[in-house]
């Protein structure tokens, strides 16, 4: 059986992709990247937003319901040094940053 990794956000698109691949006989592994931790969330953060703890929980729940493996990868350090810091540096130096 061929293996495939699906980036799981907890949303509809990645969930359906994982389901369709599983139905076609692939061994599906869901992977969620933990890229950000908000140390002081505002009341607005309670909604389902990118990188929220709830989104990670949703991805885990979807994988459990589909009967597929799930892995959470801590990418916070790499994301901060490779995306956030260069973005902030460019912005502070008057350039238009491209974050991703």
Image: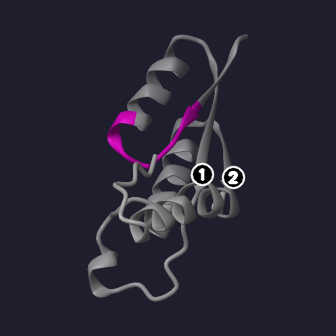
User: Residue at 60% of width from left, 57% of height from top?
Assistant: 79
Residue that mark 1 sits on: 33
User: Residue at 34% of width from left, 55% of height from top?
Assistant: 96
Q: Which residues are magenta?
A: 6-13
Asked if 43 appears above or below 81 in the picture, the reply is: below
Asked if 20 appears above or below 32 in the picture, the reply is: above
Instruction: Please tell me whether mark 2 sits on a helix, a strand or a loop.
Output: strand
Q: Considering the image in quadrants, where does the N terminus appear?
A: top right
Asked if disc 1 and disc 2 are in contact, CB closer than 8 Å, the reply is yes
Check residue 88 in the rendering and tell me which mark sits there, or answer none.
none
Is residue 31 rendered to the left or right of residue 57?
right
Tell me if mark 1 has few (under 14), some (14-19) or many (20+) residues whose alpha carbon lies within 10 angstroms of its own: some
Please state the horizontal and vertical placement of residue 74, each as a whole percent of the image: 69, 58
Please state the horizontal and vertical placement of residue 15, each as a whole percent of the image: 43, 37
User: Looking at the image, which residue sits at the far front?
Assistant: 93
User: Residue at 56% of width from left, 65% of height from top?
Assistant: 85
Instruction: Please tell me whether mark 1 sits on a helix, a strand or a loop.
Output: strand
Residue that mark 2 sits on: 73
Foreground residue among 56 and 62:
56
Queried whether the magenta region covers residue 23, the answer comes back as no
């Amino acid at each position: 059986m061929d293996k495939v990794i699906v980036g799981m956000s907890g949303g509809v698109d990645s969930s359906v992709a994982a389901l369709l691949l599983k139905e076609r006989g692939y061994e599906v592994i869901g992977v969620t990247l933990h890229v950000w931790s908000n140390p002081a969330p505002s009341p607005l953060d309670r909604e389902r937003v990118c990188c929220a703890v709830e989104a990670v929980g949703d991805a885990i729940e979807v994988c459990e319901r589909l009967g597929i493996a799930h892995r959470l990868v801590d990418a916070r350090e790499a994301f901060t040094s490779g995306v956030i810091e260069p973005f902030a540096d460019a912005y502070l130096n008057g350039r238009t940053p491209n974050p991703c």
